[in-house]
Image: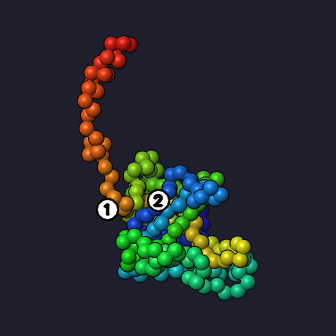
């Protein structure tokens, strides 16, 4: 059985911006990545403490491996690993209302590596992508790591796996069924019959 790093943690929360099945690039020059955001209620202090302990372990690892030349406060980095949902976005705009009263983690995984596991409550692979969606509740397994790139240094979250826990209200609007949006086209059956006769 694999050894789990002290930089890794399993946290439960609400799923947002899921990109779990297909790696996508943020822009034309970026590399495709899997990823998702996990919303953790600020009232869940036990989970937040475990996340912070894993972040602290990643800082220590970064110092020991000389990625950092000294102590680093990840919360002051450009992209903190644990962010406050009650603060505005980097561009100053407000976040969605689902972020209010929550901390959040944005975790990613490289698209050229094996896809992080996505499983159901019974630890069986999720085959139908619609079963895990923005707004449902999940366990997310992330591993924090130290980085320094072009003068930017901090702690980032690597997405290792996601487990569906329970349903929740969908974020981004309710999914509409085809019957809610369309009605039968007049003459559709007649056209179909004509095609059958021609064949």
The residue sitting at 43% across, 64% down in the picture is 16
Q: Which residue in the structure is indicated by mark 2? A: 18
Where is residue 72? Give x, y as percent.
64, 84
Q: How is the image coloured?
A: rainbow
Quarter of the rendering containing residue 154: bottom right
Where is residue 193? Give x, y as percent.
29, 18
Question: For the residues marked 1 and 2, what is the alpha-carbon distance in whole angstroms?
Answer: 15 Å
Q: Quadrant of the N terminus?
A: bottom right
Residue 169 — which label?
1
Q: Depth check: 6 or 129 in front? A: 129
> Which residue is at the far front?
186
- For label 2, the SS is strand
148 left or right of 11? right
Indicate which disc, 1 or 2, sits on the residue closer to the N terminus.
Answer: 2
> How many residues crowd around disc 1 within 10 Å: few (fewer than 14), some, or many (20 or more)?
few
172 left or right of 90? left
């Amino acid at each position: 059985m694999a050894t789990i790093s002290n930089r890794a943690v399993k946290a439960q929360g609400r799923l947002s911006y899921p990109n779990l099945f297909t790696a996508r690039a943020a822009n034309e020059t970026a590399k495709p990545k899997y990823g998702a955001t996990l919303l953790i209620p600020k009232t869940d202090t036990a989970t937040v403490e475990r996340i912070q302990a894993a972040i602290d372990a990643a800082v220590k690892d970064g110092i020991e491996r000389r990625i950092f030349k000294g102590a680093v406060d990840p919360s002051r980095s450009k992209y903190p690993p644990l962010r406050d949902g009650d603060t505005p976005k980097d561009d100053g705009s407000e976040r969605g209302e689902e972020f209010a009263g929550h901390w959040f983690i944005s975790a990613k995984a490289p698209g050229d590596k094996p896809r992080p596991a996505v499983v159901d409550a019974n630890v069986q692979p999720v085959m139908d992508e619609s079963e895990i969606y923005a707004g449902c509740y999940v366990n997310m397994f992330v591993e924090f790591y130290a980085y320094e790139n072009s003068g930017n240094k901090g702690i980032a979250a690597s997405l290792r796996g996601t487990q569906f826990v329970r349903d929740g209200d969908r974020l981004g609007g309710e999914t509409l069924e085809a019957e809610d949006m369309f009605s039968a086209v007049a003459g559709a059956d007649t056209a179909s019959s004509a095609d059958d006769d021609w064949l």
